[in-house]
Image: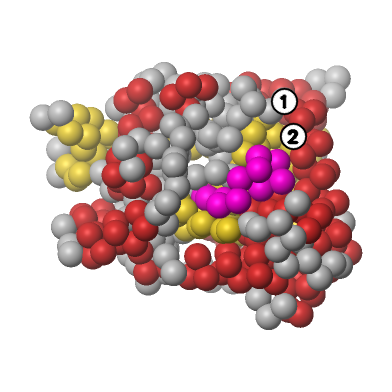
Amino acid sequence: MSVSHPLTQAQAAMWLDHERDPQSTVNNTAERIELRGPLDLDRLRQALIAMQGEAEALHIRFFEQDGEPRQRLGEAAQPPIALRDLTGAEDPRRAADREILARLDEPFSLEEGRLYDQTIYRLSPDHHIWVFRAHHITLDGYGFQLCKSRVAERYRALGGGAPLSPRFAGFAPVIAEDVAYQGSAQVARDREALMRVYDGLDLPPVLFEELGLLRGNRASTALPARLGAKLKKRAIDLKTSWPNLLFGMVAAFHARLTGERDVLLGVPVMQRMGSAALNVPCMAMNMIPVRVRVDPGAPLPELAQRARRAFDGLRAHQRYHYLHLWRDMDHKRLFGPEVNVIPFNAPLDFGPELEATVTNVASGPVEDLSFAFSSWGDDIHFTLDGHPSLYDRATLEGHQQAFVAALDEGCDAPAAATLAS
């Protein structure tokens, strides 16, 4: 039997959700990769098997010992790769869509080590969909990206392409690094810095205790290319980054919806650069509170700078996990809208014969509203998730359209009055 390890902070947050409801599927996440062109199915299977063998965090078994969660690495076997031939269906694409969404509600088993699975749907000889499902305790968004990129790289290599880059690093050093941090003096400094964000605020209770922890309804759209280009040019003109511009705009939009002036953005941080997790597919993500004051008629440059200063002030303190912060703040609500910006979402390269299109199917629960923006070149994809008890699909689509219109206007105007007032 292999040695056991404690859970990392990020894993512990997912385990807490599991303890509340072991059969819950709210932390089931999934990515969908649509492949158009002549696919070599055997090569793809080999690439998937090889990637799975490298990604140590995919093969963990969780258990409790003396009332504390523990994990053993390498104890779970690789699940078989499923092939679903839908070429005989009346509408293969629609049949695949239905099954992909339905399977989000199939639970994994943390105790048995069933943490992920892979399915390849064949819609026609030149049209396939690869779906990668995983429990959030084993992969975050960056971890998914590492795995997908490795599969594409391996697929090219098996076809006589370029040599492979080094294997994924092991997960045990990631655990050791996190344990060392939790025993360090830095924890107290980080805790103090993050708690200061809430000074003077009367925080409401968390929503999920009343409404439940649920996967959100979703509205998704691609921003017009001209708007993506305009947003990035506006950021250059203001000498800021376009993600900071979006942070400021989301804060202003939230202020308009709710009347709040001190907006607490929940911003995911990867926790990868300079860490043992840089080349390790795993769950390492944290969320930090970025407080943006939105005064009526506040100029757009000022909102962007406030967001930048707030975020930069917490960079050195981002390792203190929101689970601990939630307990420190007496289990009150830590964040308003969540804002996730992925500025360099490069397409997958399976070689010249295949075109790959990636779509996130599910990214976990949402407490209220979650804004996600991913970009490559001037293309920006905007996904808005909302708690199903608060937002139906039509309401989300209305909010999304209103935000896009305000973003378009805000990129022209010298002030954000249309957003904030």
The circle drawn on residue 67 is none
Q: Indicate whether residue 256 is drawn in magenta.
A: yes
Q: Is residue 344 magenta?
A: no
Task: Using the image, determine if residue 391 lies above or below residue 333.
Answer: above
Location of residue 42 by image quarter: top right
Disc 1 is placed on an element classified as loop
Amino acid type of the residue that numbered disc 2 sits on in the rendered structure: Leu
Q: Looking at the image, is 371 positioned above or below residue 159?
A: above
Q: Can you give x and y, in whole percent of width and height, for residue 392 in the image?
A: 72, 25
Residue 127 picture quarter:
top right
Which residue position is annotated with label 2? Answer: 396
Q: Using residue 303 as the reference point, say whether residue 154 is left or right of it.
A: left
Residue at disc 2, secondary structure: helix
The residue segment tinted magenta is 255-266
- Rendering coords of residue 226 (x, y %): 89, 64
Q: Mark 1 points at which residue?
A: 392
Q: Which of 354 and 190 is in front in this view?
A: 190
Q: Is residue 117 visible?
A: no
Tell me if 90 is positioned left or right of 265 in this view: right
